[in-house]
Image (cartoon, rainbow, N blue to C red):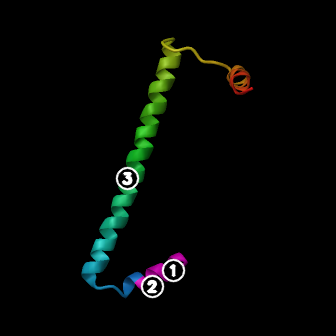
């Protein structure tokens, strides 16, 4: 179903049903925004830990080699 078809169907709903649908759709956008903000905060926290020296990074090649060793 295309967005235009969904829109046409939604307009056939009663005003109360449309209001409920609008609330649900808006709430889903808020959840996406909250998730994006949480991941941005996590990325910032991890960056700060690396920058400050509290954690050490490991090269991807080393991680893959160790993983390969564990699996074989």
Mark 3 → mark 1, Cα distance in angstroms = 24 Å
* Residue positioned 30% across, 67% down in the render: 23
Rendering quarter of residue 27: bottom left
Mark 1 → mark 2, Cα distance in angstroms = 6 Å
Residue 8: give its label: 2
Camera-nearest label, 3 or 1: 3
Q: In this view, does 56 lie to the left or right of 65?
A: left
SS label for mark 2:
helix
SS label for mark 1:
helix
Magenta region, residue range: 1-9
Residue 15 position, x and y percent, is 27, 82
Magenta: main secondary structure equals helix
SS label for mark 3:
helix
Tell me which numbered mark, 2 or 3, is placed earlier along the sequence. Answer: 2
Q: In this view, does 54 lie to the left or right of 26?
A: right
Residue hosting label 3: 31
Residue hosting label 1: 4
Residue 20 position, x and y percent, is 28, 72
């Amino acid at each position: 179903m295309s967005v235009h078809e969904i829109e046409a169907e939604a307009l056939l709903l009663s005003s109360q049903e449309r209001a409920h649908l609008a609330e649900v759709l808006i709430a889903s956008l808020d959840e996406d925004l909250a998730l994006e903000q949480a991941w941005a905060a996590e990325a910032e926290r991890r960056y700060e830990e690396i920058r400050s020296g509290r954690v050490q990074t490991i090269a991807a090649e080393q991680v893959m080699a160790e993983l390969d060793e564990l699996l074989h």
